[in-house]
Image: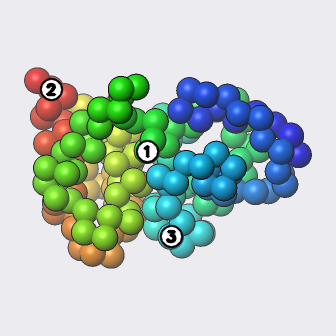
Amino acid sequence: MAFTLTVNGATHSIDTDEDTPLLYVLRDELGLNGAKYGCGVGQCGACTVLSDGAPLRSCFVPAASLSGRAITTLEGLRAPDGTPHPLQRAFLAEQAGQCAYCIPGMILAAEALLREKPAPTEAEIRTALDANLCRCGSHNRIVRAIQRAAAERQR
Ligand code: FES
């Protein structure tokens, strides 16, 4: 099935099975490896990207169904000159990643939150990221990183 997909501002022509999940297209067709395969059934959040600014589990949503949407992956957050996004800098500053497998999904879920709510409370951060799992137990550092990024945006 042929369709177009807009990812990080660029429109791509894709030809794949109609039920191929977005995650496979991103990683295998477009070479965008930021989104990770964790559970494959929409339960861990490792594959989170943004679709029109909202978090989306890319592991089970067919890419063809997202034609016309603006998809953003981790690669699309940094500035054109390669400068890391404030959330990426904050995650590094707080050493929020241990194995870091969950971090791309965490950052995109956080980006969606901060776009909607620039100064979230700790409880709102924890609620927004509740469905993004971190098996290393870095949750407190992740929350601090999001608070740091929110504070930086406020300045
Ligand atoms: Fe998609 Fe776990 S890999 S939610």
Disc 3 versus disc 2: nearer the observer: 3
Q: Residue at x 53, y 32 (%)?
A: 8
Please say if the residues under marks 1 and 3 sit with CB atoms less than 8 Å apart.
no
Q: Which residue is mark 2?
A: 154
Disc 1 versus disc 3: nearer the observer: 1
Disc 2 versus disc 1: nearer the observer: 1
- CA gap, disc 2 to disc 1? 22 Å
Q: Which colour assignment does the render follow?
A: rainbow
* Rendering quarter of residue 89: top left
> SS at mark 2?
helix
- CA gap, disc 1 to disc 3? 16 Å
Instruction: List x then y, in percent, for residue 119.
Output: 19, 34
Q: Residue furthest front?
A: 81
Q: Which residue is mark 1?
A: 74
Q: Which residue is mark 3?
A: 38
- CA gap, disc 3 to disc 2? 33 Å
Please name the amino acid that badge 1 sits on.
Leu
Tell me: is circle 3 under 8 Å from ligand 1. Answer: yes
* Rendering quarter of residue 14: top right
Task: State left or right for residue 71 relative to residue 74.
Answer: right
